[in-house]
Structure formats: structure tokens, C-alpha cells
Amino acid sequence: MGASPRKRKNSLIHINYGEIKKPHLEIASDPLDEIEEKLSESETDNADSINSIKANVPHQLIRLMYKLQLSLLCSFRKFLHDQEYDSLTVEFDDNELDKFHDIVMSNNNRSAHIHIEYLDNQHVDNEINYTKLFAKKERSFSINNYFDSFVRHTICKSNISQKKVRYLIIYTNASLDIAEDMKLRQRRCRIFYPFKFDKLDIEKCYILKDLLFSTDDIAKQQFYKFSQEEDIKTELLNRLEFSLAMQKEIKKRQYSEEFLTKLKEKFLSKLVFAVNQPSREELEQIMKNEMSNILESYTDLKEEILNALSRAKKNNLSLIYQFCVLVFTLHDMYTLDKISFVTLKSDNLSNIIKFSYKKKISYIAPYAAKKSINCTQLFPSKPLHDKNMFCVNKYFTAFLKELENGMDIKFFVIYTNGSLDINEDNELKKGRTTEFYPVKFEIIDIQKKRYKVLKNCSFINSNGLYQFAKESTAMLKTLLKFPSSIERDKIKSFDESEDEIKEKFIHKLIFATTQRDIQQLNNTIKSNIKETDVSYTYEELHEVALRWSESYDFGPITVKLMRELLDDVKNNRTSHRKIQSEDIMAEIKFAKSVVGTEGSPLFNQFLHFITRGEGKKFIENLSKNGIDLINLSCILQKTGSHGIQAFKNYYNLFFTEKGNATQYLKILETHKINLAGISSILRGSRIYATSSFEELFFMLFDEKGNKTHYLKSLEREKISMTNITSILSGAGSHAAKTFKELYELWFDEQGNKTKYLKSLEENKINLVSMSSMLHGSGTNAVKAFKELYDVWFDEDGSKTDYLLTLDKEGIDLANATSILNGAGSNAAISFKNLYNLWFNEKGVKYLENLQENKIDLANMSSIIRGTRTGCSKVFENLYNLWFDKEGKKTRYLKSLEKEGINITTVSMILSGAGLKTSDAFKALFDLWFDENGCKTRYLKNLEKNEISLSTVSAILRGTGCNAAKSYKDLHDLWFDKDGNKTNYLIFFEKNNIHLNSVVCRLLRGAGANCASTFAALHNLWFDKDGNKTKYLKTLDEKGIPLSLLISVTYGAGIYAVKAFKNLHNLWFDEEGNKTQYLEVLEMNEINLDRMCSVVNMANSSAAKAFKNLFDLWFDKDGNKTKYLTVPEENDVSFFVTTRILDSAGSGAAVAYQNLYDLWFDHNGKKTHYLRCLDLNGIKLNVMSSILYRSGTGAAKSYKSLCDLLFDSEGNKTIYAKRFEENDIHLANVSILLGNARNKATNKFLNLYKLWFDEQGRATELLLKSLGKRRRK
């Protein structure tokens, strides 16, 4: 980089390094450019709201401190290498290049501009992936976000030529999500391009190496640029987009396309990703090591740069001020034994320090002010509430939230170096404001006992303490406003009235004004540390506070925790504690759903609560009881700052402190009402989840747990709760009200059916079909049901033309309702639109042509299922692709038929394509066939290698609109350009692992990520030479067939690798020895095959399902539990039992427990459901044969069949007697009904009706089968 020092007229900070101990820092203002003044406020506000993590404290604080450490490093390195460069300068917060303003390094008139992107998220892998790089919105690592910054600089900063910019560097501790071939990984992206990167040779970039490279660990730190390969470059140029503001400016200046293309190319040539950089802790240690001989200078330089940064930005000043108060509070806690803990409550604008003094909570809200606090700041208009740090209503809202959480609040202190704008009478001055409130204040006498907590806080200056005067209370109560979210449910949340709550807040609100500024706070605490007998220096206390602030893993800080962190600091140990994301993926998803943006303080706090805090046992207990977090997340989604309390409240509904089920859960389980269904109804109830559940529960049951008339009527008419939950899904906090309204539509006051149910029953229309269409109607359930009913029936309950026509044409209503599944409140209009398409006046015979060409409507419905209101248009578009105007097949159908490709296979792949179904079909067809209808290599290569298309379709199942690309990616992984197999296929064949029967089963449903998932599985099983890795070797050595693991992980799809690894690691240790799970099974002579058959198809939950079932059968010492010993004592065969439970999958443990509870009482004695078999001489294996593979529905199916065959006394019912009278043994019937599974009862009834008439006499069919004649 060049020859002369670079002069910057608008530089914010410039350091003169003539004397390193006392660097000179100059602060200047940077005026807005002409074009930037034209940007609308809405655009700026939108950008601010999008970056929710960046807007949060302490993220801002940690990022500022990270920036400080890097600035220190560059400053010191500049001092060391100054003589090696002609005109080296280092500047901070240089706004010439917007995003790339954090640090600017220049030499010989060429510059490197650095944007710092520090991620302090400890719970997930910090990776820059495809989604982040090409996000449409303004987010961290968004390429277009950085591009816009460069364009603004180039177009609008005409006084500085863009040619001087050498590098645009994104400096981050995150890693780049690339594979060994340097290409971005696809992960779960539907739209994707494998962009490639090149490593920057740091040895040739002297200024970067000398000033920025922070460690010798070259393998870890990397500098990357986008590859300059032509296809990569072309695709990148297409992805770069000009913002709306820049588009207007470009149009105004009439730039040519050639200029714009060159602008994009220059940006890409300068962009550098400096990834895997040190953490804040590591940078701190690097600096101390490098400046070990001049540590005094290090401290001075650090403070000087920090002060300069605080003056450069108003927000920086407040952050540092808040941090200084926090450090002082920790010092007070360490020296006073009356403060038990300190914690932070963060929102988007400030930190509120919360500490416990004698078991009462006080709050300190620090804010650095540059002028006196006036009426406008205290009582701004509503839109400015959140932006004004002294807004009284803002703190009133915070106060209310703490009250909601049950906090016993002592004081709420607004702490500032500013003064109140009051007159001699302590009344607010009017000033220039249009809205003025003459509120009065009174000075606080800190010597009073009530204020002892404030007196003992050494950072509080007793002068300048005020609170509102009593005479202003009435006026203040009119000015304080309840936020709508709290006002709605205030009666349930608080015991006091509105006025009482407002008075409580006024009484507890303290204004600590004219307090020490940053410099004074620092000097005072340094002096206090020297005077008191503490084991830390100022620098060490500073670092302790930072380490605690950047990690929610620690929870509230106590003296004990301070000592632990201090020990880490003194011994140069990291305090950074990372949780591996793959171990807590479900918890991460749950946290994101409940509190929002991943990486925000709220997210970290909630994730800590459920992975390391009190909530961990909640999660474990929920899992143990088969309650999926997905069910809870749909209820508690977006509860934000209320997340922890809302989760605790909802959990406490179902479990006691000891983790035992409460009456709520017991009653639901007793009556077989699925909690998942209830959760579906309550979806979106958020902070009102607890009260909403209770309201709905007491619609179904009374206080003693008995069914109400609502539930009795539903059960009497055999209306399952499944139908109810489907229709009411999403009713949220209005669940009880909506349920009651729907019930009253179906039943009158006496509990008799109304016309709405009668008409359905008389016309043999299943409520299930109707409920599938109305799924998700929520609060609009009644309206939606009535509208759909009115389309199907007239006032007399007779079918309308809509249904009559379907009957006449032989169209099963189920096919129509399947297509319209989830139409919800738009069900009626969606049905009409589809009907009008099928039976239109233009005479297009859609259905007739489908039938003539043997295209099952069910296949078509599976493709467009869930398109809801757009179904008719999607159906029409797809039909027009298959048939011409005369109803003749187009080349699309002809080519498929010619090659024997079944529409069923295609529909499986395209399932979920939605509104883009026809485009997706066409794209897939064009991949398979050329313009002449001949097969392309994408089909030929499969045929040549005997790979079934149905195998591929199973893997690609549900790929939808990405079908063509996903198919191509998988094909290109398997075959080279000449159609030869790649190692990805060769290695499987070499080791006799069949693609069709093994790999396909595991990868079933991998969808759009099929290629990357297949490659990952290949790399898990084989090394580079095609030899088996330990994951296959161990199986061979122990004589366990691969097919056994595949059967359990069947359908894992994109989670195939994780599922396989987890199950393998559960069975074997790192040396390949069997773990206790296999050894205990062998010791107890329990066949592994048999156990695996029960957890068969557990897919991604394979390991968890296996472990849960194992833990049910054995205690910690490997001894059998009652779930195995009791059946053995009662001669109930393990083999027979597990046959019924086959394929229970992830629900195996719960299914086994349910069946056990049906068969045995609390004393381990047989219940009626086994005794009735013994009484009638029927062996359990007969029932097992009928119910084979009932899986999770085993208990329900067994009970239903028993109740059909035997009465409550164990005697045979009429059904069993008729068989016996005709010498038909149940064992013989079991042969006919074998594998009936969960449909056993219905199939038995159908067989009965086939063999016996209404009078119970044998039909001619039965007599003929038995070789008998009916007696006359």
C-alpha cells in the first residue's frame, strides 16, 4: 500500500503515535451526504428493527468491547511496524464507508476497511452459511447489505475515489460453512447455489498480516474471497441487488449497465471474509501477552480508545456508562454481605441492573445524559416511548412485567449524570414543549431507614436523589398508561386495582440525578479497590463483569461465581462454555419459537434456563412423559420476555415439583384425550396459555374430573376430540369460547343433535372429511362450518347440487376434501371453486379425461394437497399441462407412459409443490426427457445401473418445487459426465450395501437435501479409499446386521447421519465395545431384533426411542423393572407382547407402558383385559396375531377389540357367541384378520356383518363357506 500518508478530512478518530503512553485522539463529526439525507425515515427504522440481536444489550456492549480489543491490537501493531511503512495510519469509526467503518488501515493512499461482526452466541455453531449470505432482509453477513454500503460510498462520496479502497473486510469469530471442496454447504436450503471460495494468501498481504493477524494459529484463522471462476462470478453478479434508494439514484444519474456491472465486480474483488478470528477473551489475552512489558501503557491506551469510542457515538457512551455502574454494583456485592445476587434485565435500548438486597429486589436503570431531563423526555408522545430513555411510562411497563413475574420490588431507580430541569420549587420547567405537565418532585433524605439500600450503594451520590411529590400523584396516575398486553389480562395478573398499582410504582420510583460520569465512576472504583481488602484489580473486576455479561450460562452473578470467574482470569483460563448444538437441537428450536431471534440475550437466557437451569428438569420430565416440545412451542410461541415464566406456569399445570403428573394430566390420560390435540387448539395463546388451558379443561371436565355434558354428548355421538382439535386448531386464548360455540351449533340445550350433525349422519358423510377441510379454522370455526354446510345442504337438510353431482359422477367426497385439506375458514369458497372447475359450463371434462386415462384423482390430490384457496387454479394448470384443448394427452403424459413411469412416482416427488406444481412438474420432465420425448442421461443412467426410479422418488419424497434440482444434484453425485458411477455408488456396491433396500430406507424423505445427506452418509460409512469406517466395522465384528440399525432409523431423511451416529454411539463405545444397553439385553436374553422391531421406524429419534424403552425395562443397575417382571410372573409372553407393539417407533416406551397399564393393576395383578381371555380359554397370541404391528395405538386397539368381544363381567358378547355357535374359532378368524393393526375392531365388525344378518343368523355366504345349508 502506497507512499504518502492518507489525509482524512472527516475522520472520527485519529491516533498520533508519537508517544504510545499518551496517544492523542481527535474526534470530529461526519456530515451526512446529499443522497443519505434523502433516505426515508421508514427505511432506516426498518433496518434498525430487523437487526434484533444487534439492538440488544449486552450484545452491543460485548461487540463494543470486542471492537476495543481489536482496535488496541491494530494500534499497538501499528506502533511496532510504523518504521516499515511509508505512511501507515489506523483510524476508528470512519464513516466514509458506512458498514466498513470500525477500523480503517491505510498506507500509500490505499486502505483496508474493516467491519467487525462479533457473535456471542454460545449455544449454536457460529457459521456463515448460504442463508445468512443471501438473506433478502438486512441481516448480519447479508452480501447485499455490504454491497449497498459500497455502492453508497462509490456513488455518493465523490470526494474520495473508490480506487483507493483495497480491501473490504468482514472480521468475525464466526466460521464459514464450507466443505472440503471450498463450496458452501446446502444444509436445509431449498433455493441454493454452491458458491466457491478461495483462500487469501495472508503472507502476501503485509498490512493485514502485520496489523490484523492476531495469532500464529494459521490453520484456524482464515481469510477468504469468493472464487473468480466464471460461473461462480456470473451467479454472484446476478445475486447482487441495488437497494431501492440506490436504484432511484442510479436512474437519476443514468449510469450504464456496463458501469453497474463493473461496480459489482469491483465490490467482489475487494470483499474479504476474515473468519474463525479469536473470541473477545482470546483477543484480551493476546494483547496482554504482546504488551506484557508495558502493561501500564496497555491500560492507559485501552481507556483512551474506549473514551474516544464513547464520544464518537451516543449509544457507545450509554453502554459504557451502564457497564461502569454494573462493575461498581459487583464491587459493592463483593464487599457487602447484604447483596445476594446481581443480574441484568435487558431490552432493546438499555440495561436494567437488578440486585437483591435483604431478599428484596431493587432496579437501577443507568443512562448517560448530555443535557438536563425535561418534561418532554419524561412524558413523550406514545411513538417516542421506547426511544426516550427517561420516559416514565417505559419504566412503568418494565415495573409491571416484574410484578407479573411475582417480584417483590423495593425501588426502581433511574440513575444518570444528568440533572432534572426543575425550578426552585422543584417543579418541572415548561420549556418549549406544547404539552406540559407541572409535576413536582421532592428531595429524598437518604438517612431515613427506608432508603438504607440506596445509602449502602457506594456508587450512589446522596445529593440529587428525588421522587415525585405526593401532591402530583393524581396527575401522574392520568399520565401512566397500562400497555395493551397487560391491560387485557390485568385482573388475572394483579391483586390490586389500576390506581393502586400506579401509586405503588410512583412510590418506588427514584431519580438519582447528577451522579458521577464515566471518568468519575472509574476513578472512584479504582480508589475503592485500593482502599478495600479485595483479591482483584480494577482490570480483573472489569474482565469478570465482561465474562459474566457475555454468557447467560451463568445465570445471576453471586460472590461465589465472581470468585470462580476471577480464578479463570488470574489463571488465563477461558470461561467460555459452549454447548454442542447437535445435542440440544430440539431445545434450540423450542427457544427460537418461544422467545425469538437466535443469539439474542432473551434467546440465550431462555436456552440456558431449559438446558442448564431449572427448566432442564422440565424438559427431561416432558420427554419422559412423551410430551413433545413442538406441542408446547406452538402454544408459547413469541412470548418473548415472558417466555420463562409462561413455560414454568404451563409446565406446572401438568407436573408437581417432584415431577409427578397433576390431576389435569391424569384426567386427560384417563379419558385418552391427547395433549397434542389440546395444544393444537391453544396454538398462539402465548402468555395466556395457562388460563386458556384451564378454561378449556373445565369445559370438558368438572372440578372432580367427571365429564361435563359437552364431552358426554360428543362421546355419545362418537365425535372424537381429534375432529374437534382439527377444526379448532389455532383458537388460542379464545379456545373455550370457540369450543362452546361449535358445540352449540351441533347440539341443542337438551344435548340432542341439531340439523348440522343430522344431515351429515343421514347422508353418511364422515365428520373427519369435513374437519380436514376446516382444519385451522380457529376462532372462525362456527362460521366456517356453517358456510361449508350451507354449500352441501339446503334448509331441509337435503343434498344440494354440489353433492348430488359428485354422487352422480361417482366422485368420492374424500378426494375433494383431501385436496382442500387445511382450507380452514375459506373451506366453502375453496370447495365451490374446485367444483366449478370440475363441472364448468365451458364443457371441459377434467374428471372424465383423468378417468379415461386411468389417472387416479387421489394421485393428483396428493400433489396439490394443501393448496387451499388456490387449489382450483393449481389443478387447472396441471391438467392443461397433461391434456390439450381436445382432451388428448400432451407429450408430457405420452412420454411418461411410454417409459413406464407411473404418475404415482411423480406425485410422490412433487408432493408439497403447492402453487408452483405445474412449473415443478415441467422442470422435472425437462430434466428427464429431451424435446423429442427421448430419455436423457438422467433416466438412462439409472436404468443402466438398475437403480429403480421408485427408490429415488422415495428419497426425494416431498421435494416439491425443488424436485428437478434435487434430482439432478443426486444424480450428479452418483454419476460423472460420461455416465460412469462415482465412488459414492462404487463404495456401496463394493461392500454389498444395496441402494434400493438399505440406503433408500434410511434416506427416505430427505427431499431437497438428498445429495448432501447421501454424501454425508457415504463419508460416515467409508474412508477416502472406500474402506469401512468404525461405524460399519463394529457392526461386522459384533455380528449385528446393518439392516437392524436401518430398520430403527428408517425414514430419518435429512437427519440420517445424526440418527445413525446417535444409535451406533448408544450401542458401542469409542473402542467399539458394547455398551450397557446391549450387554444388559444379552444378559437378560432379550433379543435385540425383537426390541428393534418395537422401535422400528423411529427415524431421527431412533437413539432416544431405544433408550426410553430400555430405561422403562431396566433400572440404573441393569435389573428388570416391573414392566418386564410382572408380565413374566403372569406368564405373558414377551414375544407376543412386543408383536402387538411392533413399529411403535419414537413412541415405543409410552406405547408399552400404556399396554402394560391396560393389562395389569398397581399390584401387578391381571386386569379385566387379560382375565377375560383366561376365562374364555383364548390365548393372548390369538389377539396378538390380529393386532400385530398396532404400534403406538396398541393399547387402544386391544381395548376396543376386547370391549367388542367381552362385556364388563368377562362374558362373551353376541359377536363372540355367534362365531362360537357356528364352530368358528377366534384363532381361525385371526388368520383372516391378521395384521389388522389399529383397524382390527372395524374389520372384525365388517366380517361379522358379512357372515351374519341383523337377526344374528348365518348368511348364505358363511353357510356356503362352511358347507352347510340353511334349515327351512
Image (cartoon, helix red, strand yellow):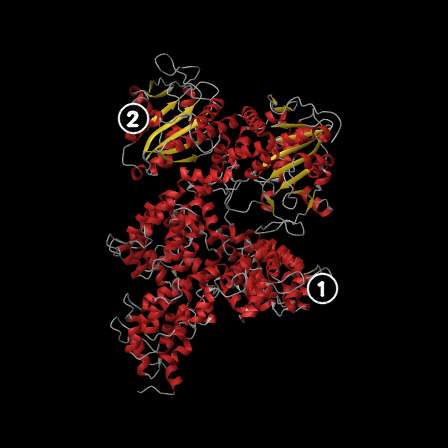
Quadrant including the N terminus: top right
For residue 15, side relative to residue 492 (left or right) = right
**Percent coordinates x, y for residue 686 in the rendering:** 39, 44
In this rendering, does residue 332 appear at all?
yes
Name the amino acid, label 1.
Answer: Asn
Provide the residue designation for mark 2. Answer: 450
- How many marks are shown on the rendered structure? 2
Give how far apart the Cα atoms at labels 1 and 2 are: 85 Å
Which sits in the foreground, 1008 or 540?
540
Question: Mark 2 falls on what kind of element?
Answer: helix
In this rendering, does residue 728 appear at all?
no
* First in sequence: mark 1 vs mark 2: 2
**Percent coordinates x, y for residue 429 in the rendering:** 39, 15
Instruction: Return the residue found at the far right.
Output: 3
Name the amino acid, label 2.
Answer: Arg
On residue 980, which mark appears?
A: 1
Which sits in the foreground, 61 or 81?
81
Instruction: Give residue 1193's quadrant in the image.
Output: bottom left
**Percent coordinates x, y for residue 1248 in the rendering:** 35, 76
Q: Is residue 593 above or below residue 375?
A: below
